[in-house]
Image: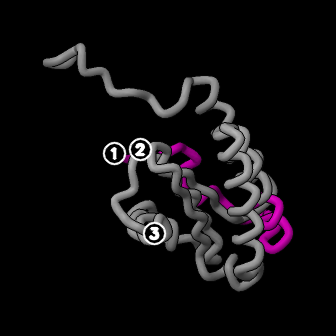
Amino acid sequence: MGLFPFFKKKEFFTEPEKERLLQAIRQAERLTSGEIRLFVESRCGYVNPLDRAGEVFGPMGMGNTRLQNGVLLYVALLDKQFAILGDSGIHQKVGQEFWQSAATKLRSQFREGQIVPGLEACILTIGQSLRQHFPHQADDENELPDDIVFGR
């Protein structure tokens, strides 16, 4: 028990919502060597959330995948901002139009208040693209954790 029990940190998602998002990540990565990570925080201290995504990309190990096929989905819930950042290997395969299309779909879901379903659909869409361009090989291993990272 903390020093000030009445200052309880608000959770971003319920336990069932967290599990739903974790299952989406696992399903999306199941048939690919690619890696998907979800980073969630309340506020983005930058005008452009892509800058914040870039700041956390390296420390989360996203650039350390063997085929440079890691994708970070960054969300600042209270600021209603997000960014999708793919490493160079996947970006070369899908191009800017893919990221813009995924962002447009996610933005639409967020506007309807469908945060968890929107994230889930985005994760699965990214997974389909990763499967197409980086199919699972016999020697593939899960290079990065499948957990959700919660920031400030």
For label 1, the residue is 152
Q: Amino acid at mark 3?
A: Asn
Q: Is residue 26 above or below residue 132?
A: above
Q: Amino acid at mark 1?
A: Arg
Give the structural element (helix, strand or loop) at label 2.
loop
Dot in front, 2 or 1: 2
Residue 68: give x, y in percent of width and height.
61, 76
Give the structural element (helix, strand or loop) at label 3.
loop
Badge 2, how many Cα within 10 Å: few under 14, some, many 20+?
A: some
Counting residues from the start of the chain, the first of labels 2 and 3 encountered is: 2
Please state which of residues 116 and 114 is positioned toward the viewer in this rendering.
114
For label 2, the residue is 42
Give the structural element (helix, strand or loop) at label 1.
loop
Mark 2–mark 1 Cα distance, whole angstroms, equals 6 Å
Badge 3, how many Cα within 10 Å: few under 14, some, many 20+?
A: few
Q: What span is in magenta?
A: 126-152
Quadrant showing the N terminus: top left
Which quadrant holds residue 115? top right
Q: Which mark is residue 48?
A: 3
* Residue drawn at the location 73% of the way across and 52% of the way down: 108
Horizontal side, residue 113 vs residue 124: left or right? left
Task: Confirm whether the magenta stretch covers residue 59.
Answer: no
- Look at the numbered discs 2 and 1 and tell me whether their residues touch, using CB distance below 8 Å: yes
Mark 1–mark 3 Cα distance, whole angstroms, equals 17 Å
Q: Amino acid at mark 2?
A: Ser
* Residue drawn at the location 39% of the way across and 56% of the way down: 44
Residue 37: give x, y in percent of width and height.
57, 55
